[in-house]
Amino acid sequence: MSHNKISLANTNHSGLLQVAASGYEPIELMIEREFNGGKEVLSLDGIQPRIYDTNVASKEENKSWMRYKSQDLRYSIAESFVGPGEYTYRLMYVRDACNHTRTLYGSSSLKGGNYERESLKSTVKNGKLVRIKVWARPRVAWALGSNIGLSFKRSSDPARKGPIKLRFSVSGEAPWTVAYSVDPIEKIDGKETVKSIDLKKSVMKTLNVAQDGYGIIEADQEGIYKLLSVTDSRCQGGNVDIAPITITDSKPPALTVSSQAISSERCIGEIGTRIELVFQGEGPFVAYYKERIGNQEFERKVNTPVYKHILKLTPELPGLYEYTFYKIFDLNYPSGIKIHSVVTQTVHPQPSVKILGADLKKSCLGQTVDIDLQLLGNGPWELTYSIIRPNGATSTSTIVSDKKSTLLQVGPFQNSGLHIVELVEISDSRKCRRKLQLRSTIVVRESGPTAEFICPAGGIKTLEGNKALLPIRLEGEAPVDLTYVWHGNTTNIISKKITKTQMSGSMYDFFLPVSEIGTYEILMVYDYCSGSIGANSRCSVSVEPKPRVWFQSNLFNSDNTPQVPSICQSNSISESIVNVELEGSGPWTVKYMVQRWKDLDDSGPPELESVHSSVVVGQSPTTLKLNSTEPGYYKYKILQVSDQLYTLPQVVEHSALQPTIITQKVLPIPNGSLVVYSADGNQISTSKAKLIDQTSNSRTLNSSPIQLCVPRGSPLTDDYEWKRVYKKYAPKIRLEIEPMPMLMSPFTAWIELSPANSISQIIKTPLIHTFNYTLDLSERLPAQIGKFGLRIIKLIDSNECSFTKAAIDGMSVEAGIEIEYIEAPSLNPVQTFIPSFEFNRNPTRESSGDMETLSNESETFSQHLCKGDVLSFDILGYPSWSVQYRYNERIKTTVLNKPIFKKLMEVPGNFSIQKVCHQIKNSCCADFTDLNYIVHSLPSAKVSGGHNIQQSINQGEKVEIQIELKGEAPFTFTWQRKSLPKSSHKGSTSKILETHTIQNHKSNTYTLVTSLEGVFQVTYIQDKYCHYPRPKSR
C-alpha cells in the first residue's frame, strides 16, 4: 500500500486555499495558521470518499480498498482575511483511512547517522508551508473637517477668483489613483435640487496622488463633486461611500433702500428719516454711504450680519440731508459691488443743547467756571438752568442767546464743595420747547497746589556737558502747570506741565532737567487753582571740574617741551621717574602713549609705539616710571583721563602750564668686543657677547683657549726677542665697539690682561676716537710661552655711560679671549754626507683646512742627492705627526707615530719637505722652504762603446781605447789593466797590472793610448754630484 501524499496549492482570488493530497479516503488533515503572532489550528477530518458501494464481497476486500485510493485529491479551504498582515499556513500531518499518518512540517530524516530537519526553503518548495501577504484596501476621505457634506460657493470677485481647492487624504501603499465625478446641478424655481445621475452629463476624472498621502481637487466649475474609488499599488478599493461636496456659483450682493420721514410729536416738521436696508447675498454685509449737508460731506458705514437693517437718523442740525449708498460687501464678494441709491430729507430738529468738554469741572473759591454749550435747532434760544450748591440751596436762572456756541458762566464760588449745574429746558424761535436732563458737576477747592525745590545746601553738582536734575516736590491735582526762570536770562519764562500719567496722587516728587549753570527760581504753580511757592523757591547748579593730569618738569628742550634729564640704558625700568599732577575725584585712570625713536629726535615715524593704561589710587602728585631698558629718544604723551565722577575718558589737552608731553633720551651703553685677527688679517676668534646680558648675569666666551703656533726654539726668554716674535707672529687684538645712535666717542676702555703664570693687570686706554681700535700689548705681555686672557672690564663713552663687569647682583660678566702659544714641530736631517747647514723652518697653524704661514725671510736653496740615497730626519714635537713632501710634481702625506722620517730616493728629480704638523685638533704646522733636494742619476762609463772587443796588436804598435763618460762634468774616474786570463774556464782570475785615476776631467770622452796587452776596465767614476759604486755602508 502506498503512502499518502499532500501539499498546499496556491490560493485563488476568491480566498480559497487548496490542499492537494493522495491516499485512502476519508483523510484527516491538521493545518496550523499563524497571523500577527497568534497561532490557530485548522482540523479537517472525516472527509468522506466520493464512491459509496456497500455490496462489495469480502473476498474482494483488497480490490475494494483500491477503489477508495485517490491519485490526486484537492480540498478547498475558504479563508476570510479579516485584517491586513502576513498569514502563514503549515501542513502539520495527514492521516488516511488506513491509519497511515505522515508528519509533514518539521519532519526530519536520518542521514549519516544524524537526524536532519527539513529546511524552511525545502518546506516552501514542497508545499508544506505557504505565506500569504494580505494588504489593506486603500481608503479615501475628504480632509475638510466639519465641512463634509456642505456646499461651497464660487465668486467672480477678484479677491476670491480661482478654483476652490477640495483636499482629500488617502491611505494604503503609494502611489494612488483616485476617481471622482462632477455632476451638474439642476435649478428649479430658484431652488437647488440634485439631478439623477446621468453618465452622459456627468464628468469622470482621475487624479494621481504622490507619496505624502494628500491630494487636491481644484473645483473650477459648479457641480456636485463625488469621490468614486481609490486604487493603490496593491489593491483596488472599489466604490467609496462618502458624502459629496456641492460647489455653486454665487451672485453679487444687492441692496434695496427705502426711507420714511420721522415727525416730531411736539413740534411742526420732520426731525429725521428712517431708512430700511434689505440685502441679498451671503452675510455678514457691509454698506458704505455718504451723508451730505450743505457743503459738508461725511463717510458712514453700516455693518450687519442679517439681511434686513434699519437706520434711524435724527440729526441735531437743521437742513437738507442727502444720503448716498455707493458700495456693498458680503462674504463672497470681499472686494465689494458698486451701487447707487440716494435718500434725501429736510430736517427740522427739536431744540437741544450739548455740553462741550468734561462733565466734571474743578475750581477754587472766588473763581468762576465757564461751561461751553452748543445750542442746536433754530435760534434764538432760551435756556433755563439750575445751580445746586453744597448746602442744598438751589437757584434757577434763564439765559437768551442767538449764538450756537454759548458760554454759561457760573460763580464766583463762596463755598467749597460739590456744585451741580442742571440744564432744565430749552426753546427755539418756533416756540418749540424741550425738557432737558443734562448736568455738569463743579468741584470747588479751598486752596491751590504748592511747589518747592528740595535742593541740598550746596546746590546741585553736575558733570560738564551733562544736564542737571533739580528735585521738586509738588502737591496738588494733575494736570499741573509750573513756571520757572533761570537767573541768567530772566526774560525767558519756562513752563513745565505735569500730566495725570506722571502724577497719580496728590503729592509728586520729580526731577526737572536743566542745562545751564546758575540759579533757578519757581515763579508760579497752577492746576485748576492758583497755587503757592514754598520756602525753597530757588536752587543753584554748579559743574564738577573735569579731571586733569599733566607732567611736572622744570627742564625744557628747544621746542619748549618738558623733558627728563638723559639717562644711560639699564636693565631696570625704574631708574628714572617723572612727577605727574592730578586733579579731580580719585581714583583716576590715565591712558598714555609711549613712542621710541632710535635717533636723537622724533623725526620720522617711531620705531616703537605702545599705549598703556594705569590706575592711580593715591593722592596727587604721583610718579610715572620711565623705560630705560632700550636706548632711544622717548616721548610720553598723556591721552585720556577719567576719575570717579567722569567715568568716560576725557581727552587731555596740552598746554605750556600743564604739559601732557614729556621727552627723555635713553643713552646706549657702549657694547664692545675683543676680536683676534691673524697676522695676515683673517679673523681667528671673537668675544662678541652682549655686555649687558638680558638672560644671564655671568658669561664666559670660550671654554677652550685659542692656540697659536710659534717657531720651535724661539728665544722667548729674551724680552727684546719676545717682543720681536710677538710683533711678527702674534695675532692682532682689536677692540670693536658697536656703533649705535647717540653713542659718541671718545671712549675709555679698561681691559684686564691675565697671563697664565703672571699677575693680572688692568690696561687703561683713554681717548679712543674710533669704533675699531687695535690694542698694542707688546709692552704688557711677559716674555713667556703660554696662554693669557683678555676681557673688557669697563667701557665708557663721552656721555659717561659705562659698562662694568659688576652686574646688579655682584657677579662678573666676562667678555674676553684666551691665547695659548704652542711650539710648532720640526725636522732635523741626520745624513752625514749631507752638508751641515742651518735649516730654515716656517711654523704655521692649521685650522679647518686653511693654512696660515708665518713670514719667512730666509733664502730658499736646494741640496743635491743621488739616486739610491736615503733621507732621514728626526722629528721634534708631540706625536703623532704628518709629513707632507713633494716628489717630482706629486704631493704626498705620510702619518708617523715615531719621531723619525726616512725616504729612499728612487728616481732622479726634485724632492722637498713642505710641512710637518701635529695630528691633533687645531694642530700646529711648520712649513719648510729649505728642505729642497735635487736627486741626480748615478754617473756611468763605457769602454769601447760597452762592447767586449778583442784586438790583437804587434809589438811596438799602439792601440786607442775610447772611454765614454755619462754624468755632469767634471769627472773623476779610475781605470785598471788586468792580465789576460790563462784559460777560458769560469772562475779563473786575472792579476791587476796597473791602476790609474783621472781627476777633474771636463769632457765626456777619454782616449786611452796603450801598447800593452791586457784587459782594460773602469772601476770607479764620479761626476760633479755622485759617484759609483756606492759604499756598502749605505
Image (spheres, rainbow, N blue to C red):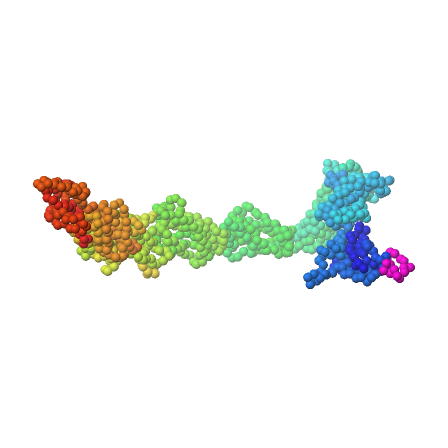
Task: Let me know if residue 219 appears in the view.
Answer: yes
Q: Position of residue 807 (x, y in %)?
A: 33, 58
State the image coordinates of residue 783 (x, y, percent, origin top left): 20, 56
Q: Nearer the viewer, residue 496 or 223?
A: 223
**Residue at left 70%, top 49%?**
358
Seen at 41% across and 56% down, the residue is 622
Q: Quadrant of the N terminus?
A: bottom right
Q: Residue at x 75, y 47 (%)?
A: 232
Confirm whether the magenta stretch covers residue 55: yes
- Image position, residue 876 (x, y; %): 23, 56
- In magenta segment, residue 980: no
Magenta span = 49-64
Q: Nearer the viewer, residue 532 or 175?
A: 175
Q: Quadrant of residue 290?
A: top right
Left/right placement of residue 328 relative to residue 644 reads: right
Q: Residue furthest right?
A: 55
Query: In the figure, is residue 880 to the left or right of 500?
Result: left
Horizontal side of 525 relative to 834 (left or right) equals right
**Residue closest to the eye, 265 or 113:** 113
Q: Position of residue 322 (x, y in %)?
A: 77, 37
Q: Residue at x 80, y 61 (%)?
A: 100
**Number of dots carrying numbers:** 0
Q: Quadrant of residue 405?
A: top right
Is residue 352 visible in this depiction of the protein? no
